[in-house]
Each structure stands twice: as structure tokens, then as C-alpha cells.
Image (spheres, coloured by chain):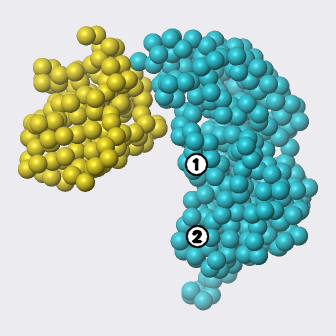
Amino acid sequence: METREIIMNHYTSSPYKIKKEDIKDYQKISVQSDSCIDHLDIFVKIEEDKIVDAYFEGEACAIATSSCSILLKNCINRNFTEIQEFITNFENMINDCPYNEKQLDEAIVFREIIRQGNRKACAYLPYKGLKQILGKEL
Amino acid sequence: MNIEDFPMLKEDLIYLDNGATTLKPQCVIDKITEYYTKYSANAHRGDYDISFKVDQEYEKAREIVRNFIHAKYKEEVVFTSGTTESLNMVAFGFFGKFLEKNDEILITQSEHASNVLPWFQLSKKLGIVIKYIPLDEHHYVTLENVKKSITPNTKVISLASITNVIGDERPIKEICEFAHQNNIFVVMDGAQSVPHRKTDVQDLDVDFLAFSGHKMCGPTGIGILYGRKELLEEMEPQTYGGGMNESFDSPDEVYLKDLPTRLEAGTPNIAGVIGLGEAIKYLEKIGMDKIEEYEKNLRAYAINKLICIPHLDILNIESDSGIISFNVNDIFSQDVAYHLNKYKICVRAGNHCAKILKKETGVQNSLRVSLYFYNTESDIDNLVDLLSNKEKIIEGML
């Protein structure tokens, strides 16, 4: 699939952008951009050292929404070490440091887009949120 | 009109975010540069020529502001960092001294954060009650609804004269008349109105007025607090230090200067003050009535075209100002703004700091076009052309 198609699919019909009634087993983190109006509420269900389920709500642009969707897809059923590796790899990519392309799955679609204006902050917003959750757990 | 005065417009920029801040004409830039290059001394140190010149220019600017808003006395004009600081000074420095538990403040759900949060804080501190004047079906404030909202405990009505999302103009003069008959103070947030039309604080009979320089072709970091002299005399400074004191020996022996200096502690934003004076001179040369009329005509031109676009949802088809808020159906406002940016069209996406307005309109975020006198019909044509093609917006948002 092309970059555009991947982003639009995750933006318009993400399987992770849902509303759940029963959230008692989930940790919630809200992240808001400092420079624009992106707002995401991320919910994760943690068992031992693993995220076993995750979803999100909120109002955000195509880049922030699709980035969140791709991130959560890559976190479910992974342990904290693996998730941390994924996040570090993504950070390396957006900061022009060496990174492992194969490990990034669909998150690679943001390789060029993050060079456009404020879009880097949009793509990184969900990562900021997830790091706060992981920070509590590690 | 007057496009040639603005260096930023020499590029093919279409700047439609004037509610956030305005572009600066060359004369304002020159005036600020002149201060920094020819007499860059501190104020209130008139022992040498260039500092004396600073004081002269600084006080000249105050007189320009006084005349511009038709205040009675120069002492009623206080330089602040902007509308936000001015409103905080009014809330904490004046009303923080006098209000008591269960006293009521009337605002609306379409106020900017700067006319909401200081009152929220005061409410937590003093136990005062914040009430909202109901808006009519167009999200307007009517005198009738103000009358219905007051109780024997109402002490303050604090309103934007023009709101920053809906752009409606409030009947401030009528509200002041009614409020004063009932011993209620009126605070006017003039951030969106003072730059766009004539302001006469004596005719309005408003108790306090706050506005910002950067929204009226002036520099950032400078604003005005106007207050009736007898009220400012009672205002507690929110900042203490240099410049504002007469003498001090101990905590019980602190003597402050007279108005307005006592409310301007520290080295002031001298370049900002002088630049604001120049900006006002510039606006007056064009004429505030002319600016108002031009913007109204341009808005009508824009609305007539925008309402023909079927996928636009306009929040304020009717409005008294140059503000148009809307959404493109099914597309997040920020993505539309991003698309327009590719064509050098600057518009704002978001809640525009009016975060409780969604309770009123049911709309969380929107795009906002806010006009000024240097915008043109051609700017609008370009905007309309891009907004007309929804497929192109979807294509262009990435």
C-alpha cells in the first residue's frame, strides 16, 4: 500500500479508535499538542509487563490520528521492552538518527511527512502519551 | 486597502488570522527600530537627553491611547503586556479586594479564556459565584437576557465587546446603563473590537476596558488597561518593585507613586509602548469608521460566496465583525488549515481559546477566518476557490 493509503485508512477507519463502556481495567492518558489542537485520550490494558489491549479517542488531525492507530497496533501483545524499542526506533527516525526500518512496520509512512511544518509534533503526540504510561510502569 | 504599507504582504501571503494577531506596517517597524537605534535608554531617568526623549515618547504614546479610546484622563491609561494581564489586574487587583463570598459575576460561554480563568481563580479563592448569561439562537447577548440574569448578588458583568469565534457585538452601552442603575460594575474585553471600530469609554460608560496592541498593527507584548480614575485609585498593584514606588523603609512604610505609574512596576516595554502609539496614529490616519465599513463589506462579500459551498457549515452567517467560523463537513479543521497553508493562506483551526463555547454551539473545533483592512476580495476569492473543492482538500491535507 502507498503511504497515503495507509495514513488515510488509519485516519478514517482505525480499528483502535473506538469507545468502550467498561474501562475499569484500562489506564488512561490524555495528551494535547502545545502548538495545535490535536487531543488524544489513550487507553491501555496492562497485564504484568505487557500491553494486552489498547484503544484511543479524541479529536486530532490525520497525521496524529493515524500515528496513534499505528502505534497502538504495534503495542498490543508486546512487552514493555519491545514497546520501548519501537518508540526509540520511531524517535530515531523523526530525529534523523540511525533507525531500523523493518521494525517500524507502517510507522515508516511518517518518514517524510514529519519534515512538513508542524507535522512532526502531530506524528509524535501519541508516543508522548504512551511514554507517560510506560514511565509509570517501568 | 493600504496593502503597500505592510512588508509581510510583499510576498504572496494571504493572512486571514487577524483575530490572533495582525501584521505590522512599516511605520511601526521603523518607530521601534528608531527607539532601539537612536535613543535606547530606560524610562524615568531624565538626567540625560536620550532618557528624557524616552519619557517624552512614552508619555506621548499614553496621550495617543487616551485620545483614541476617549478616556477623560491620561492617568486612566495603564500600559500592560496585553489584554490577558489587564483582565487579571482587574480581577485580582480590584475585585479581589472588594468581592465577598456568594457575590456573583456574569460572563458568557463564548468568552475568551482570559475573561474566564481569572474569574474561575477568584471564585476558588473567595467563594464568589460565576454565572453565564444565556445566549440567543445566534449565540448573541441581549439586554433582555442580561436583565434576566442579574440577582441582588450580581456585582460584575464582564464581557467581550466582540467575541473571538462568533464575532457578535454586544450592546455594551445599554448593558452599562442598566448595570450602573443596579450598582453593578462592567468590565469590557476589547481585544476583538478596539482594533476594528471606534471606542469611546466615556460614551459607553464602561468601568474597565482591556485590549492588546498586537491585534491592531502594534507590537506584541503591549496592551492597555483602562479604568475609571476613581476605580484605578483603589486597585492593588499585582506587581511591586522598581519604578512604581515613591519611597520605602520597612514593610509598613512603603509609599507608592501616583496613577498610572504605580500600576506599571519594573522597566516597561518601552519599544512596545512607542510602537503602539505609532500603530494608533496609523489607524487613525486611515480612519476607524472607514476600517469598520471596509471590513463589514468584505465580510459580506466573503459570506455571499462561502454560503454557496454545500460542504461548509458556517457557525456565524450573521455577525457584526470580520470573523467567520466554519467547518468543512467530515474533515478535521486542522487538516483543512494545513491544506490552505500549502497555498500560503493563513487561517486558524481550533477552539480559539473559547473552550466552553462548545457547550453553546455543540462544535468543539472550527476554522476561523478573521479579516482586517488589508485583506482584499482577491484573498477571499482564493480562499473560496480552495474550499470549494472538497476532494482537493482531502488530497491536499497530507
Q: Label 1 marks which chain's residue? A: B
Q: Label 2 marks which chain's residue? A: B
Q: Amino acid at mark 1?
A: Lys
Which residue is rendered at x = 67% and y = 59% of the image?
A: B132
Nearer the camera: disc 2 or disc 1: 1
Mark 2 surroundings within 10 Å by alpha-carbon count, few (fewer than 14), some (14 through 19), many (20 or more): some
Taking B103 as reference, is B274 above or below it? above
Looking at the rendered structure, the secondary structure element under dot 2 is helix
Mark 1 surroundings within 10 Å by alpha-carbon count, few (fewer than 14), some (14 through 19), many (20 or more): few
A2 left or right, relative to B367: left
Q: Is residue B11 visible?
A: no
Q: Is residue B333 visible?
A: yes
B340 left or right, relative to A29: right
Q: Amino acid at mark 2?
A: Leu
Which residue is rendered at x = 54% and y = 74% of the image?
A: B125
Foreground of the two, B22 or B270: B22
Q: Which residue is mark 2?
A: B122
Q: Color used for chain A?
A: yellow
Q: Which residue is mark 1?
A: B359
Which residue is rendered at x = 58% and y = 28% of the image?
A: B327
A20 left or right, relative to B392: left
Report which quarter residue B195 is drawn in: top right
Question: Which chain appears cyan?
Answer: B
> Earlier along the polypeptide chain: callout 2 or callout 1?
2
Q: Position of residue B393 (x, y in %)?
A: 51, 15
Which residue is rendered at x = 21% and y = 30% of the image?
A: A73
Is the same chain shared between marks 2 and 1? Answer: yes
Foreground of the two, A83 or B102: B102
- Verify CB contact (< 8 Å) between mark 2 and mark 1: no
Looking at the rendered structure, the secondary structure element under dot 1 is helix
Report which quarter residue B184 is drawn in: bottom right
